[in-house]
Image: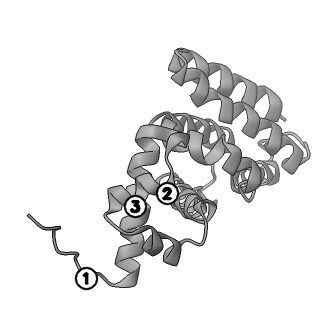
Amino acid sequence: MGKPARRRLQPEARRQEIVEAAERLLQRDGSRVRVEDVVREAGVAKGTFFLYFPSWDDLLETVRERLVAEFDRLYPLPTEVEAPVDWPAVMDAQAAAFIDFAAARQGIGQALFHSDFAERRPLALHAIVRLAAVIRAGQEAGAFAPVEPEATARLIYAAIDEAPRAVAMGADRDATLGALQHLLRRTLAP
């Protein structure tokens, strides 16, 4: 029996196939995944991989951008266009969303945010920028203390980032979330 015939795909569809194969493997196996695993999963040649992604880090960057965009789509930030916003509740909800989102994606999260790749290509401060925007909006509404938004966002992010790892290691999710929300309220209270 010969090899199955290769499907002819448009370049973007082939690239997407590689990205989706990487996502599946990273979710299952985390940082242990290599180019060879992805090409085998996607059913493409190694040369095809490098046609679309000049390096492993380029693929990981693409996967990370998709993950961040998914979070932003699932948990958009409100605006005060239609009604006043309860900014402390928004911060609480963002913390809960991040814990649940990250806990459901432990393998891929480890590979993208807590690995050598993450040190070589730090996230473009997306989460910190997002948190700083919430802090600024809350300050403008009089709901948050006059703290320095970026520095405070960086420290808050460290706590939020640790929470899903604690849950993955066996910590009670509700207790962890409650402690995190208490910390956020105390830090940002006017």
Measure the C-alpha gap from mark 2 to mark 3: 6 Å
- Depth check: give the residue in front, 30 or 144: 30
Furthest-front residue in view? Answer: 1
Q: Nearer the viewer, mark 1 or mark 2?
A: 2
Q: Residue 39 carries which label?
A: 3
Q: Quadrant of the C terminus?
A: top right
The answer to whether mark 3 and mark 1 are in CB contact below 8 A is no
Q: Where is residue 173 in the image (x, y as percent from the top left)?
A: 52, 21
Q: Which amino acid does label 2 sit on?
A: Val
How busy is the neighbourhood of tag 2: few (under 14 within 10 Å), some, or many (20 plus)?
some
Q: Quick one: SS at disc 2?
A: helix
The answer to whether mark 2 and mark 3 are in CB contact below 8 A is yes
Which residue is drawn at the image coordinates 67% and 29% (left, top)?
Answer: 162
- Depth check: give the residue in front, 13 or 47: 47
The answer to whether mark 1 and mark 2 are in CB contact below 8 A is no
Furthest-left residue in view? Answer: 1
- Residue position for label 1: 8
Q: Quick one: SS at disc 3?
A: helix
Q: Position of residue 48 (x, y in %)?
A: 43, 74
Which residue is drawn at the image coordinates 60% and 48% (left, top)?
Answer: 112
On the question of residue 171 being in view, the answer is yes
Q: In which quarter of the image is residue 21?
A: bottom left
Q: Position of residue 16 (x, y in %)?
A: 39, 70
- For marks 1 and 2, the one nearer the N-term is 1
- Residue position for label 2: 35
How busy is the neighbourhood of tag 3: few (under 14 within 10 Å), some, or many (20 plus)?
some
Which residue is drawn at the image coordinates 38% and 49% (left, top)?
Answer: 24
